Image (cartoon, grey):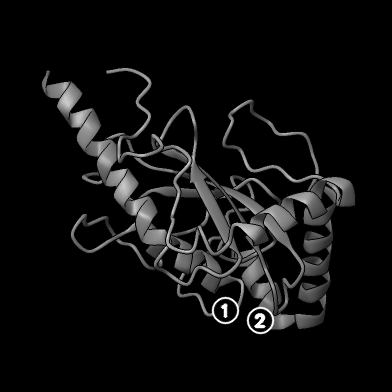
Amino acid sequence: MKEIVSVFQQEYIIMAEYRMLQTENLQGIYTIPSYENSLLWYGVIFVRSGLYAGGVFRFTLQLPDNFPDDKVPVLTFTSQLYHPAVDVNTGILRLSEVFSHWDRKQNHIWQILKYLHWIFYNMNLKVPANSEVFNLFKTNRKAFVEKVKECVASSLEHLYDDPPTEDKHYITFKPYDSMVHDTAKNAMLRHKDNDESSHGISWVQPGSCDPFSKQC
């Protein structure tokens, strides 16, 4: 019984963390917990300006089993990203730059996503995850920019790749189709006023605040 209560408490905490994202100015970032596992989040960031402008980079956010009373969550880029804050072998974003540990009273998931946004516009790192990339940025800006351009182009080439999972909440994209997308766009515009105060969460039971728990 204690374990059941603990699971539900954790899911409500995660749901609260997800709701917080709606109050923050997380430009170009879209994320959602996995349908199968609320500790795994899928995300994508659209970079709108700067060296990485035009890039669309996918990532996952893995919350630890005992979240929020545990270590710092792990953000991993699943798109290739040439950046000094990202480990070239694992794709993991170095979060120790801003999170030495995780304090449930002080730290929240939106802060990780804010930092994620920040790295695309700032290279001033105390301890880079990839010193080779960082040194190139410092010593040969032209070569660095070329590498970044290749990285951005690669992200767009793989934008419509088949999803690596059958999870219903994995974020996918399809090429523009006016017959499909214009219809959806017009429908959303028609209902915009009615939905102005609505903040739906797809992994929460409609009409309630109950998370979809697979098992207890």
Residue in view at x 82 percent, y 45 percent: 180
- Residue type at mark 1: give it: Asn
Q: Which residue is mark 1?
A: 122
Is 186 on the left-hand or right-hand side of 96? right
Q: In the picture, which quadrant includes the C terminus? A: top left
Place residue 60 in its image quadrant: top right
Q: Residues within 10 Å of mark 1 (few under 14, many from 20)?
A: few
Residue at point 33% right, 17% down? Answer: 215
Left or right of residue 32: residue 39: left
The answer to whether residue 85 is seen in the rendering is yes
Provide residue 133's location: percent of width, then percent of height: 67, 67
**27 lies left or right of 67:** right
- Name the foreground residue: 70 vs 139: 70
- The single residue placed furthest to the left in the displayed view is 2
Circles 1 and 2 in contact, beta carbons < 8 Å? no
Residue identifier under label 2: 138
Q: Is residue 157 left or right of residue 51?
A: right
Indicate which disc, 1 or 2, sits on the residue closer to the N terminus: 1
